[in-house]
Amino acid sequence: MATFANGINKPLESHGNFDLIKKFRLDFADVHVSKWKSRSSGLSVVHLDYDAPLVNGYFVVATEIFDDSGCPHTLEHLVFMGSEKYPYKGIIDHLANRGFSNGTNAWTDTDHTAYTVSTAGEQGFLQLLPIYVDHILYPTLTRAGFITEVHHIDGQGQDSGVVYSEMQGRENTAGDLMALRMQRLLNPPGSAYRSETGGLMEALRVLTIDQIRKYHHTYYVPHNLTLIITGKLASGTQSLLDVVQKEVEPRIVEHHQNKGVKPSGWKRPFMETPSADRKPIAQTVKETVEFPEKDESVGELQLGFLGPPPTAFLERKALDILGTYLTSSAVAPLNKEYVEIEDPLCTYIYFGEDTRATYVDLPVYVGSVPTEHLDSFDEKLRSSLRRIADEGLDMDRMAMVINRDERQLRSKIESSQGDTFSGNVITDFLYGSEDGSDLAPSMDEINLYAQLKKWTSKQWSDLLRKYYVDPPCIVVRGKPSSEMADRLEQVEKARIAAQKAKLGPAGLAECERILEEAKKEHEKEIPKEILTSFPVPSVKSIAWIPVQSFQESVKGKERAPAGQQANSELAKHIEQDGSPLPFFVQYDHVKSDFVTVHAYFSLANLPDRLRPYISAYLSSFFSLPVTRSTGERLNHEEVVHRLDSDTVSYEVACGVNNVFTETMRVSIKVEAAQYENAIAWLKDLVYGSEFDKERLQVTVAKLQQSLPEMKRDGDTVLGSVSAELLYAESSTSRMGSVVPQVEFIPKLSQQLQESPAEVLKDFEEIRKHMTDPTGIRISVNGDILALKEPRSAWARHFGQALPPSELAPLRLAVDTLSAVGKNPVKRAIVVSLPTIESAFVTHTAKGIQGWSHPEYPAMRVAVEVLNATESFLWRYIRGSGLAYGAHCGLDLEAGLVNFTLYRSANSMEAFKQAANVIKGLTDGSIALDETVLDAAKSSIVFGVAKSVSTPGRAAIMSFINQGLKGVSQNHNIELLEKFQQITKEDVLDVLRRYFLPLFDSSSSVAVVVTAPAKAEQVAQELGKIGFDVEQRTLQADEEDSEYSDSEEGSESGSEDSGR
């Protein structure tokens, strides 16, 4: 019998089968938490109740496994293939998309699997909940699902499958190889913490559906499932419990799973099994793990320590703060000693934490260590930590670190609200006390800060000694090996050849038949009436966050006329604060405790020869000496320390949200009381920084050392090579990407040694062009009505620097296209990259340019129709196990469309399938149903709601729309009307005119980054369909140019998470 919150054996409150276990309100955030448990089935429900436009669900199962078969991960994928009650592949996503969501997702961790969904408003969420739980508890788990989703051998004798492709992309990376070795060394035989829950390729090749069914039967039971819901439900937690009581519990009874809170023989995963038997590390163990990499200059390092018990919340928070103190900035003790030096010993040190039974794990990650220092690094680091403990900590800096951490938590709570704590609830489900007594303390972070502020230097030193200095640890060194890269390629080629030979022509034909049969089984149409019985909610049900907006009127930028009535209060407040400013400022007011100032500096007039410098300029921006406007000179350490004391956060980057990358953005977020201070910092960092030779050498050395790690990543290399093809040398993002930087940074380093004055002159020239008043746009967002002097503060600090001038139009990506980018035809580049085993691909063709283009609504709906979870590309490509991700994209700034593949096991087959889909849709041989159109439009609603779902996001969107895109303040919400009017004919028309050309070599270009073993074959096949193919290999030797004939750049594509 459970003991309830009042300590007696009687629940505080009941609702049907559900008893209230715990209920409380967070005193530092308006979040009400309640935890309920069914007496009948043991199912738990936790609701974090707060005002927000989005409702989020995390449905979590504790998944413990004692081998590397990958059952938890493969099962996570198979859950989405249909349930007993809804036996159709992907129906859950079709329904989610109709209910103002962008589909479902999931992830598998070492100790749990979480199934997620977010909807705009509650209606779609409550409709979907019972159907989703049905999939989790009662999935179909068919053999056909296993074949496409987990693993199969195709007609060519190649291994494939969605999970297989995903693990193929991960298994031999430095991170995965080291993590697995660490797990094995840290945990004793018999512990589930030793397992690779994702599944090793070798194990996936022999895994069967029966093993997965057995695993599901054991762990996917109601008393091992918790439903976590965050957000506002109109009729409160009651409406949630009603749905679970009426629609979920009866299904559990039908399956005879109503065996109470803890059925006899049930052992709580990790807590009541051998995994809980974790002993302190007996002695230090050091091992070296090789990973495939042609460039052997830098390796990786991981140290493993054991921490306090998972419920020791104060000590865990203290360790988190200690890690921040040691490594958070250029002046943190370890960064000063190891990173901020002319020959860096690494590029970062990061102190992590993984929650585990009995004791948490405390991993320390060290990145890009020169190979010659790998063997001795751990000893050196331990002695540095010992010295810091002996000398005592700088308590002024520690006070600043705690205060800043607390400000950042408050800022995060303002933007994510109760969702900030979803992770705490998951951890409590796995490791917290079953009576709910650990839940409130695990969330009471603000109180923990108050306690830590009273700690003495001795308490911090003792903590450092107790966990990182005195005890033994596990050391895993990741060492790059060119020989291993070659060996893996040979071994894989030989394995496939042997597999083909063993199967023979008849066996291969049989493999192909089995695969085709499985695909056919998935093609079972979902009855239309099931889809239409799930009503599309009304857009009126969404509560948009109000933003008041006001612009200073300057030449070249006329004030946006729309919605000035709604903004009259703000206009009045600003207009009574001094005379109008002669430069462009837009104020966006939302309810908030914080204010953020953003300044955008145009890079349009920068000479092209200086564009490669921008990454070094950005990297050094906040850690140079500065002369303040007051005349005070600060060295770089004082700059970092004071910035950390005064701000919540600060950032410098090219553009915002991956657009407008031909501008440099500086953002500083502060508490409202520090508003003028933020403006002063902005002025002094831009105009008063000194380009100091020593500081620039440190920045450049760090950049140089991090490049090998960057060019091991398929996605990063793909972005860079594509940019080289599509953009000219006048593109800042092209010149700042990995491949040109690999060539440029060593030269810059040499130049700093030989003729530093030249380099400093170049940096001054960058500043001169960047601060041209015709190219500066300023955005202020936050609680502007609470600011005494929203306008005059700018006049005081920038009045001299920015005289009245006409604002020049923004330079866009379309202005920096190369000849190929303007006319993308025929060209294909195949890059062979030894560190990957699957392919990353992008095909590009001409699209539409500009945010108010009349064809945009049709294009946007078409993209959603193609990309939606379980829609066409997903079904034909991912559903056939050809790639982990496939999608079409629009680039309105550059006027291009693209098709990309992420972690593809068979990129040419995936390309052909995508071509078939779009041809089929446009010639009518594949039906485009109205229900698909409805779901696409609903899914777009979710995307729009999410983009303005917090006060900060809503304010930024108001500025991007008016200040950068030149459209109305609520442009994206106004477009919702236009999306609703798009017809099936409109969609087919744009598919025909813009997306079909992506699959024809006479109207598109292609870039493929793939494993060396596959490069030749891909190049041949692209040649066969009419491309002029150029092949390249990323070289290992830094002295050579990075590859035969090259320069390049750009942002990389997006990654699917979890599922």
Image (cartoon, rainbow, N blue to C red):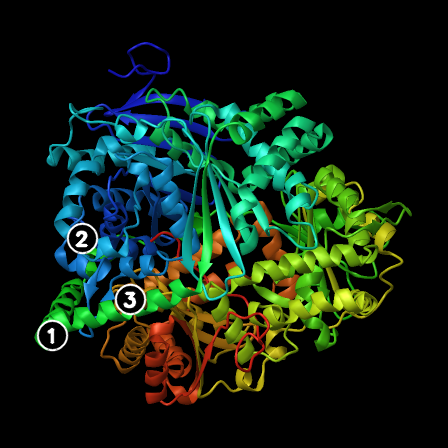
Query: Does residue 709 appear anywhere in the picture?
Result: yes
Mark nearer the viewer, 2 or 1: 1
Quadrant of residue 250 within the rendered picture? top left
The residue tagged 3 is 491
Task: Check disc 2 and report its element: helix, strand or loop.
Answer: loop
Quadrant of residue 456 within the rendered picture? top right
Taking 330 as reference, is 575 left or right?
right
Nearer-N-terminus badge (2/3): 2
The residue tagged 2 is 207
Task: Check disc 1 and report its element: helix, strand or loop.
Answer: helix
Front in this rendered view, residue 1044 or 276? 1044
The amino acid pointed to by label 1 is: Gly
Mark nearer the viewer, 1 or 3: 3
Query: How far across and how far down the image is residue 333, in percent?
Result: 67, 39
Query: Label for residue 862?
Result: none
Nearer-N-terminus badge (2/1): 2
The residue tagged 1 is 504
- Dot 2 crowding, Cα within 10 Å, few <14, some 14–19, many 20+: some
Query: Which residue is rendered at x = 29% and y = 31% of the image?
Result: 275
Nearer-N-terminus badge (1/3): 3
Front in this rendered view, residue 519 or 973? 519
